[in-house]
Image (cartoon, helix red, strand yellow):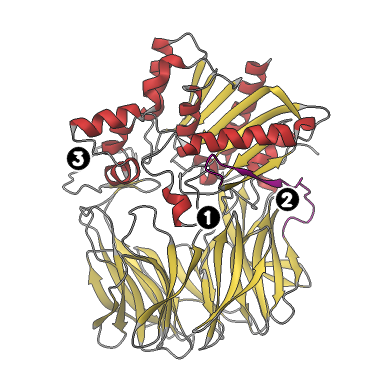
Amino acid sequence: MGATQLTALRSLSQPVLLAGQLYAAQSYVDDIANDYQTDLISIVNQTATTLATNISQLTATEHALFYQQAGQVYRRTGDGQATQLTQTSHKIVSFAPTPDGTKIVFAVLVSDAEAFNTVSDRPQVRHYTKRRYKADGVGFIDEQRHFEVYVATIAGETRRLLTTDLPVQVADTTTTQTLLIAQTTTEDADELRSALRWLDLETGDITPLTTEVAEVHEATIAPDGRQVLFIANDDQYPNRRVASLYRFDGEATTIAFDQEELLAGPNSDIVVQNQARHVRWLDNDTWLFETGFHGHTRVYQGSATTNQLLLDTPQYLQDFAIGKGTVILAQQDTAHPSQLLALDLATQGTQIVFDANATLQFPRAEKYVFSSEDGSPVDGWFLAAQSEGPAPVVLYVHGGPHGAYGDAFFWEFQRFTEAGYNVVFTNPHGSTTYGQDFINAVVNHYGEQDFRDVIAGLDVALQRFGEYIDASQQIIIGGSYGGFMTTWAIGHTSRFEAAISQRPVTEWLHLTGASDIGYNFVQDEMGANPYTPAGREELIKRSPITYAAQVKTPLLMLHGEYDLRTPIAQTEMYYTAIKTLTDTPVEMVRFPQAWHGVSRNGLPNLRETRLTVMFDWLKKTLA
């Protein structure tokens, strides 16, 4: 099989059911527009029909479908009649329909901020007084921005309910009141915090539901209109706290599930539309929810007294919808990009109801488990090269560090195997889906057990899959934290024949003030205050650039010029250090108009070009 272009893939998300009919959002690359498009599709007998284009935030009640299109919210009934419900010039950040489908509540962002890097004939200066003044993927934050919440009816009436300076999200709504996730701290706070608030649709009055947790991520109201399930985390372990499931029974809040991580799952590079909910009510007494567990997704049925495991297979679930006795799952795994499955709640069996990528075939990654230095198990995966005879091996390190690889489809890995490379990827200490203690292990200890984990995972792969691997050609690649690990590794070992560092952290002191999250991330993760002599000394010791003079491994460095998470100076400084201190071959490639997530959601042509650049450089370097 030839190289699979990004344009060939389809990604399914946000499945919904209306009167027994299945709908979903299907995303793909529009090659002409050099962008991503998401269509509303209906599915009958495993065949999809496109009903609307360029949609987002697909949801449904028993009476209608609702979605955003061209910046407005539309209501679509089963007979195909679509009605525009909003008429706003501001960005709609969230919305929810009432259960009877007669109105929606929506929140908008009101801002005069220009787009990032806008070119103007008469540019204006920008003034900032807050510490959090920019965000990767967004640009600069307008300090004069505010948020407004409205209710709109199918009869065409729109009424404003709330104006607030702090961000709000419409989580869910009944016919009489809306549940808001309200940010409670300003951009100058050390950590952003949020809480749940009831908003009365008639009076606009606000009533707190809970203040017992630090950050709320999503919430859903029971059919009885009183109970609420929500996913949140408390204020332990800033930046890295595992999210749990909470239940408000109408009077008090309790933890419904905290044995595994919610909102955690393996990385995938083909997801375009984010998941709508990770927990949904079956009825007033039971609910379904997802967890991330050891690199894959689990499904549980919960109640006030029990949590029953329903599904535990090597896969990543992008979303789900509940029908009568059936759950529709948007699913992928290492060998398949995206499809819809039906889970029978009685038998717990599954069957395919729509395969968006039926004509494509990919090899499956093999999972293996190895021991860390303290005896704890660590997961790894091996994806064999699609070539004859032993081939070079790529050790790929994920970002975060609080992220995870796993049983999900990764287009980039498949492209590497098509190009003739074996791929090894692991979840070292610090990764998610293994619990709080595993996450905490890397904090204040970057470049220690985590480094030895990824090296050990490669060593085990060399032994276990040696027949496929040319051990004389070992390569390390990583992005973000993986870029840190790549530059850290080549400063501490010369075992690799080549290294590719993408959007790395190479110097912690600079990151503190230059990154959109740096001022709290560095303190929380490294345990060192960059504004004290002792803290600066520790951060210098922990920075890969300190060891640049020891680098002997040929290095390719890739970075997006718009990156505000790990600004491009992180690459520029390291590149200059290698050029100044060594005669080691090093090359820098800059990606214009590219944010930190260039490899996941960057412009499609840049994502294809990025792989071509890597393959060409590796071919030249390993020759």
Please say whether residue 136 is visible from this viewpoint.
yes
Instruction: Please give the range of residues in magenta.
Output: 356-375
Query: Residue at point 38% right, 29% down?
Result: 570
Q: Residue furthest right?
A: 388
Where on the picture, by quarter, is residue 225? bottom left
Q: Which tag is nearer the camera, tag 3 or tag 2?
A: 2
Q: Which type of secondary structure does the marked residue at label 3 adopt?
A: loop
Q: Which type of secondary structure does the marked residue at label 1 adopt?
A: loop
Mark identifier at residue 458 = none
Where on the picture, by quarter, is residue 180? bottom left
Up-down relation of residue 40 to residue 463 (above or below):
below
Task: Look at the image and say whether residue 365 sits in the magenta stretch.
Answer: yes
Q: Residue furthest front?
A: 375
Q: Which type of secondary structure does the marked residue at label 2 adopt?
A: loop
- According to the picture, the residue beneath numbered tag 1 turns out to be 434
Up-down relation of residue 507 to residue 359 (above or below):
above
Q: Residue furthest top?
A: 583
Q: Marks 2/1: CA distance?
A: 23 Å
Q: Marks 1/3: CA distance?
A: 47 Å
Three-letter amino acid code at the position of disc 3: Val
Between 76 and 245, the one lying in front of the other is 245
